[in-house]
Amino acid sequence: MDFNDTPDEAAYRAQVRAWLEANAPRRPVSDDGEGGGSMAASKAWQARKAAAGYAQITWPKEWGGQGGTPIQQVIFNQEEAKFPIPPNPFQIGLGMCVPTVATFADQETKDRFVGPALRGEEIWCQLFSEPSGGSDVAAARTKAVRAPDGSGDWIISGQKVWTTGAQFSDYGIVVCRTNPDAPKHKGLTMFWLDMHDPGVEVKPIHQMSGGSGFNEVFFTDVRVKDSQRVGAVDDGWKVSLVTLMNERLAVGGASGAGWREFLEAARGVAGFEGQPAIKDQALREKLADWYVQAEGLKHTRNRTMTALSRGQTPGPESSIGKIVSAMQMQELGNAAIEMLDQYGIVSDPELAPLHGGFHSSVMFAPGLRIAGGTDEILKNIIAERVLGLPGDIRVDKDVPFKDMPTGR
Amino acid sequence: MNFDFSDDQKFLKAEARKFLDANCGADRVRKVLDDDARGFDEALWKAVAAQGWLGAAIPEAHGGLGLGHLELCVIAEELGRAVAPIPFASTVYMLAEAVMLAGDESQKAEILPKIAAGEVIGALATSEGPGLLSAATLKASVSGGKLSGVKIPVTDGDIADLALVLAKENGQPGLFLVDLKGAGVSREAVKTLDPTRDSARLSFDGAPAQRLGGAGDGFALVEQVLDRAAILLAFEQCGGADRCLEMARAYALERYAFGRVIASYQAIKHKLADMYVKNELARSNAYYGAWALNTGAPEIPVAASAARIAASEAFWFASKENIQTHGGIGFTWEMDCHLYYRRSRQLSLVAGAPRVWKERLVSQLERRNAA
């Protein structure tokens, strides 16, 4: 038991580090918080990685990858993170959309899209969630109907929501209702489409945290060719499962203020009897719990990496990450502002500790507990896929989609 | 990255499970639970000694197998899973570790081979009553090589041969080896929450005592021993917590209420998912502790604290929610749920309560992250 690279891994890490030393940016670019302000830098860095084969290491060589192993990708990510690299708006496309299209598309389509996506020339987004279905993705109502002119084309209309990166995406994959008479999982079809189509309208969502990292996307009679269909008609649910299986192995942790920042802040804030707040036993116990959780997640990632290093499939333990980190973000942020007593309400970055970092945690954590699988859905996944407990009793499985109660 | 046990260690773990399945079923544990006169399962203890487990981490030169602490970790996990009613922790994690840490050559040569052979049962005697012990409150004292004082509770105190006793000598706290079968020792069994483990009040009145380690090192040495024990105990706790999750899962899948298995209700599914999350956090922290223990890293105190806190929380949660998942039948003497509930209390308290370890952890983080 150790934390060392194998000789092969060490050699790969050295190779990666040498390449990064010679090629990676040395100064951070300023970001407008929505990925737009640094887009030129992001694209330039992606193109440079693609030219050297580092854009998608595990992809086959004919796609521009290295045919490498997951552990090599992890090593690259670790080393890359040591440099002030620009944000990566390409991962949803490269990790999920493009592999899905490529799995079902003909050679011509693959040749057309894989390279530009890899080089960062074209950005993809994933259009799954809708106002009527977040956790319940198969409840999608955005519809696609055959054009009446007999061309075989499809006309898409409806609305998606919480689409990351739609505002700067060139293409998207979209799940549509094609057969409302079938039960809900059996009447969906997947398409790819051009986000620059005049029938596509992207509106930023104003989050409760103040920022706008996600979008609503409206489709008004967007015409797509039948050749833009991904997979068979009414088989879109199975196709979307391919998309989700391609989801990149999440080895990173939650960012933001953690136990170190809390410890630091608690040293500088007055507590009971004129003592620093860090002397407060209640806060010390919480700090210990957060440290233990953070260490638990770190070493769980190390266990996952070990499985990858040994060429094994990681165990289900990696599924606990977001449940623990999102909840901790909320609790730790809140404990930090309560520690400030009346002053805790002040969130002005000029006045608040950590430039308002704890306040940001409090305001962003509700979103993190929902995004990418709510706490409740993630617990269902652990219960059903890890522990083998039965799925929930379904009242919607054999009912035609059009007859399903919707609440409004 | 190689943050896992080796195939050999996993094989040893699988063998240990097979052995304990055959030799330490719930019926065996209950024989100790139901008989106030029995402090442990002597036959199991002998069988465990014959397996070589007692000397797994003791060097070959001193009669052990000379394997290492990683091997001891996998054995500990299986002992915890089986709620084994034997003085393994007192003897191996505490006495043997203390002698290997601080014993002189003659003490090592005298004691370690007997531990490995199963001829000596150990006990660590620090507590003198309710609350935390400090140098200011420590009463037991040694004068002219003779120990006087009272220690309660001493886990395995009623069955042990050799105790490690924290006492003052010339005003300085030290750790002393005391032959419990010798003169000046009287002992009395103490009723505890976990009758599958022995516990006693030890009264010393001029009992011959031999110091282990330096004069004045008593508390520091106890801390070092407990750090090492905490990591091994964390593996026992992980084993127990995982077993509770298995029991809850199995019962939830067979028990029907309102026309369906209770495992199909989200209230139960999410409870079991919460157990899984806590168990995995505990396991990952325990692994880090195992690494630190095995390499003798300076991170041992921090790693031990984190392992102990996470494992205590996981076992407590899993053992209480296992009973809850079982409903009424889980509250009966006949169901095994309470064996784990009891053991979770014993393991959380035997090497100091979690809140004490939390304080210790934060103190160390403060020092490590000094401004």
Image (tube, coloured by chain):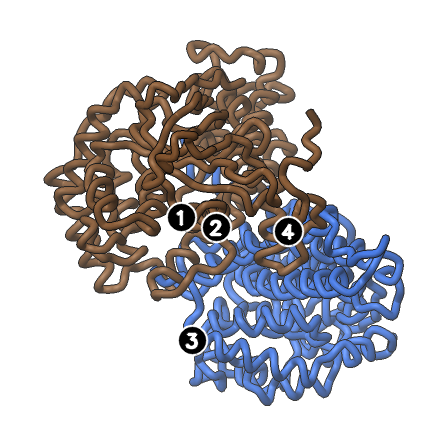
Chain colours: A brown, B blue
Of residue B206 and residue A381, the one placed in the foreground of this image is: A381
**Disc 1: which residue:** A231
* Residue occupying the point 59% across, 69% down: B77
- Helix, strand or loop under label 1: loop
| Crowd band around label 4 with a 10 angstrom C-alpha radius: few (<14), some (14–19), many (20+) | many
| Crowd band around label 3 with a 10 angstrom C-alpha radius: few (<14), some (14–19), many (20+) | few
**Disc 4: which residue:** B273
Query: Could you say which quadrant of the image residue A274 lies in?
Result: top right
**Disc 3: which residue:** B7
User: How much space separates mark 3 and mark 4, taking CA atoms?
Assistant: 28 Å
Of residue B315 and residue B228, the one placed in the foreground of this image is: B315
* Chain letter, disc 4 residue: B
**Disc 2: which residue:** A238
- Helix, strand or loop under label 2: helix
User: How much space separates mark 3 and mark 1, taking CA atoms?
Assistant: 43 Å
Question: How far across and how far down the image is residue A388, in percent?
Answer: 63, 60
